Image: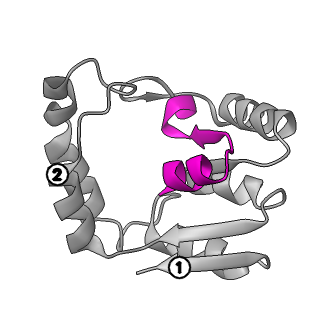
């Protein structure tokens, strides 16, 4: 969805997955990633940013004019994971991506019950507190 919005409006699109990881399984320090995100925002008058990193999204809401919350439910996410294409910008091969599928499915199943920055409760609070134009997709 972010790519489509960015393409239709000729806007730069930042996928937070591309900034937050030093390598698979090792996340960069939050302040390092936040500085890179801030550089992107300062370098672009308008932009689209996508990702589930609640702490980063929360920090970005001060610069955000629209917020789109993709919340189709656990079953839809699990099904989408099974049919997602290989993401060569994230994984060296389709096999490497598929090695993470079981972990990803388990992680998604816990979305409604966990309490971290990737949880429904964290995302819900960001969305509910945002005062600009917003839309939730269920």
Quadrant holding the C terminus: bottom left
- Where is 124 relative to 13, above or below? below
Q: What residue is drawn where x is 67% and y is 39%?
A: 12
Q: Is residue 79 left or right of residue 129?
A: left
Question: Could you tell me residue 50's position as x and y percent?
Answer: 55, 50
Is residue 51 among the parts visible in the rendering?
no
- Magenta stretch? 1-20
Q: Position of residue 69 (x, y in %)?
A: 53, 70
> Which residue corresponds to mark 1?
136
Task: Please indicate whether residue 99 sits to the left or right of residue 51 in the image.
Answer: left
Residue 113, image quadrant:
bottom left
Please name the residue that numbered disc 2 is placed on. Answer: 83
Q: Secondary structure at mark 2?
A: helix
Of residue 73 and residue 116, the one placed in the foreground of this image is 73
Residue 42 in sight from this viewpoint: yes
Asked if residue 9 is among those painted magenta in the image, a careful observer would answer: yes
């Amino acid at each position: 969805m972010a790519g489509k919005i960015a393409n239709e409006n000729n806007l730069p699109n930042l996928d937070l997955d591309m900034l937050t990881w030093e390598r698979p399984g090792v996340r960069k320090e939050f302040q390092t990633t936040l500085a890179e995100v801030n550089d992107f925002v300062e370098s672009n008058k308008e932009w689209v940013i996508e990702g589930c990193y609640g702490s980063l999204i929360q920090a970005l809401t001060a610069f955000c004019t629209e917020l789109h919350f993709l919340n189709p439910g656990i079953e839809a996410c699990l099904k989408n994971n099974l049919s997602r294409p290989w993401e060569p910008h994230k994984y060296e091969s389709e096999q490497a991506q598929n090695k993470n599928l079981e972990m990803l499915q388990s992680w998604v199943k816990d979305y409604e019950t966990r309490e971290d920055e990737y949880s429904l409760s964290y995302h819900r609070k960001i969305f509910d507190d945002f005062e600009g134009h917003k839309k939730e997709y269920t």
